[in-house]
Amino acid sequence: MRFLLTSSFFPPYHIGGDALHVKYLAEELVKRGHEVHILHSLDAYYIKRKDNPERSDMEGIYTHRIKTALNSSAYEAYMLGNSSIVSRTFTELIHRIRPDVVHHHNISLLGYSLLKKRGNYVNLYTAHDYWLICQRNNLLKYDSKVCEGGGCLLCNLFHGKPPQLWRYSKRFEELIENEIDYLIAPSNYLKTKILEKYKVKTVTIPNFVPEPPTDIKPLASNYFVYAGVLEKHKGIIELLKTYKEIVNETDDNLLIAGSGSLKTKVAEFINKHKLSNKVHLLGYIIKYDALLSLLKGAKALIIPSICPENCPLIALEAISVGTPVIASNKGGLPEIVRNIDNELIFNSYEELKQIIKNFDRKKIQRDKIREVYREFYFPQAFCENIYVYIPPTER
């Protein structure tokens, strides 16, 4: 079959897990003999980043990049919900490659008009975040609590974001409800939130990550690890405060991998409270094998998010190397952790303290965790699930 995947970001021009998912999916489809095209936006990347990453074209994957003067297409898509050049490029691609399946991913900086069908193809959309129902994408009101609806204008003004008035148009709602054949939600939590607002065929298919190399060596043990962006909604400051209160009651270190706007604040916290002998800021880890090695050596990965996470790849990567996940009871996180051990889900940071202090590595059966990975988050499992929603005549 011919697939056209649309995504605001695509490696190496990316900043998050949604783009990595698209890359992993494209690679799996190529392995299975399909022709895969990617439409993505360089404008979107250069709004977020100023560097020029080294390009690495992937065998069998055809990329089509949007680039305009002053990154105007991304600004246009954000403010108006549509970009004329993106829409025109997309339409030309549909007519030229005649895809059997169009699979939309994060199109926040490409424009929602891509959801309208331009041909006879299966139209899929994967909701990697809450973009369909939340302008800030993370369903977190005022960066402090999970939004229960309403107050969007004030919330966006609080964060200095101009309101996207197109979100209130009938056309936006109609395209979601009438043009998408199947909407894929990586967690039941997100599926429920979407169905509260839209009438659309929605299925839950968890994300996946590639099987790790067999020669990954773990780092020295007796540490917990946080790996992710250093931003407020990820709960990194709350994790540091929690660890500070028990630092003298545990022999375990805390390793922090990642970068973000709170990097300086995190470093200052560590120095101010004299935690540098136990808490280590590693920065952003570029090499994938190095990240897997860090995860494999850890007692557990800690995800202390304030926001309702969907199905974060870092959790699946930890599970793929047999490492358990300790996570806040937010969004889709408990759906992942329940497959390992309910006792690793915390509702308060007081509970997190107790989990860290009483963590018994001997109870963790890493082979069982690897079995969880192969059952739920393995590439084959994902592809088999997604094929269910493609009519046999188009396989």
Image (cartoon, helix red, strand yellow):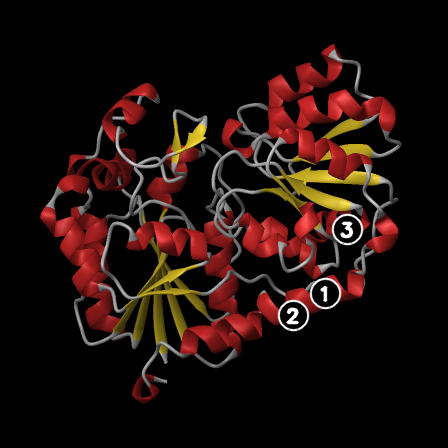
Q: Is residue 68 visible?
A: yes
Query: What residue is drawn where x is 51% and y is 54%?
Result: 20
Q: CA distance from mark 1 to mark 2?
A: 6 Å
Along the line of sight, which residue is nearer the eye, 120 or 195? Answer: 195
Q: How busy is the neighbourhood of tag 3: few (under 14 within 10 Å), some, or many (20 plus)?
A: some
In the drawing, what numbered circle is on residue 293?
A: 3
Residue 48: image x %, image y %? 42, 34
In the picture provided, is 193 more to the left or to the right than 119?
A: right
What residue is pinned by disc 1?
A: 370
In the picture provided, is 339 more to the left or to the right than 107?
A: right
In the picture provided, is 173 more to the left or to the right than 239?
A: left
Query: What residue is drawn where x is 48% and y is 65%?
Result: 25
Q: Is residue 213 visible?
A: no
Secondary-structure class at tag 3 = helix
Along the line of sight, which residue is nearer the eye, 34 or 347? Answer: 347
Residue 317: image x %, image y %? 65, 55
Q: How busy is the neighbourhood of tag 1: few (under 14 within 10 Å), some, or many (20 plus)?
A: many
Q: Image quarter for residue 155? A: top left
Secondary-structure class at tag 1 = helix
Q: CA distance from mark 3 to mark 2?
A: 19 Å
What residue is pinned by disc 2?
A: 374
Q: Tell me whether the residue at label 1 lies in contact with that at label 2, contact meaning CB atoms closer than 8 angstroms.
A: yes
Query: What residue is drawn where x is 20% and y is 60%?
Result: 177
N-term mark: 3 or 2: 3
Q: Residue furthest left?
A: 170
The amino acid marked with disc number 1 is Arg
Q: Quadrant of the N terminus?
A: bottom left
The amino acid marked with disc number 2 is Arg
